[in-house]
Image (tube, rainbow, N blue to C red):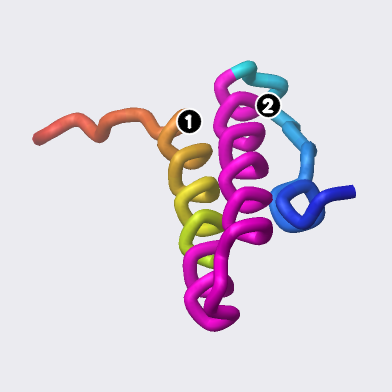
């Protein structure tokens, strides 16, 4: 299991293909950072931000716009 797979995981309760695609790209990016990144602190920060980005991206897929009163 790669570092990206370990961090992001493959779980997709919604079974939306968009969730799978977002997670696949994040896993790919984390694995590239692990392979080529030099500074451990910056690598960790980048990976944490990708993790957060995935969370918000997936959350945005199920967000419905609020109606204005």
Q: Position of residue 36 (x, y in %)?
A: 59, 58
Question: Looking at the image, which is closer to me, 61 or 26?
Answer: 26
Q: Which residues are magenta?
A: 18-47
Taking the spot 63% from the left edge, 19% from the top edge, the residue there is 16
Taking the spot 27% from the left edge, 30% from the top edge, the residue there is 65
Q: Judge from the rendering whether residue 49 lies leftward or rightward of residue 8; answer left or right.
A: left
**Nearer-N-terminus badge (2/1):** 2
Q: Does residue 8 lie above or below 18 as drawn? A: below
Q: Quick one: quadrant of the C terminus? A: top left
Q: Which mark is residue 20?
A: none
Q: Judge from the rendering whether residue 68 lies leftward or rightward of residue 43; answer left or right.
A: left
**Disc 1 crowd, CA 10 A, few/some/many (<14, 14-19, 20+):** few
Label 2 residue SS: loop
The residue under label 2 is 14
The residue under label 1 is 62
Taking the spot 64% from the left edge, 40% from the top edge, the residue there is 28
Q: Position of residue 37 (x, y in %)?
A: 56, 65
Q: Position of residue 6 (x, y in %)?
A: 81, 55
Residue lying at the far top of the rendered structure: 17
State the image quarter where residue 20 is shown.
top right
Q: Position of residue 61 (x, y in %)?
A: 46, 29
Dots 2 and 1: beta carbons under 8 Å?
yes
Q: Main secondary structure of the magenta part?
A: helix
Label 1 residue SS: loop
């Amino acid at each position: 299991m790669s570092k990206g797979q370990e961090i992001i995981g493959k779980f997709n309760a919604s079974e939306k293909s968009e969730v799978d695609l977002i997670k696949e790209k994040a896993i790919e990016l984390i694995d590239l950072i692990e392979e080529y990144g030099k500074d451990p602190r910056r690598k960790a920060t980048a990976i944490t931000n990708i993790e957060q980005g995935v969370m918000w991206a997936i959350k945005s897929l199920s967000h419905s716009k609020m109606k204005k009163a």
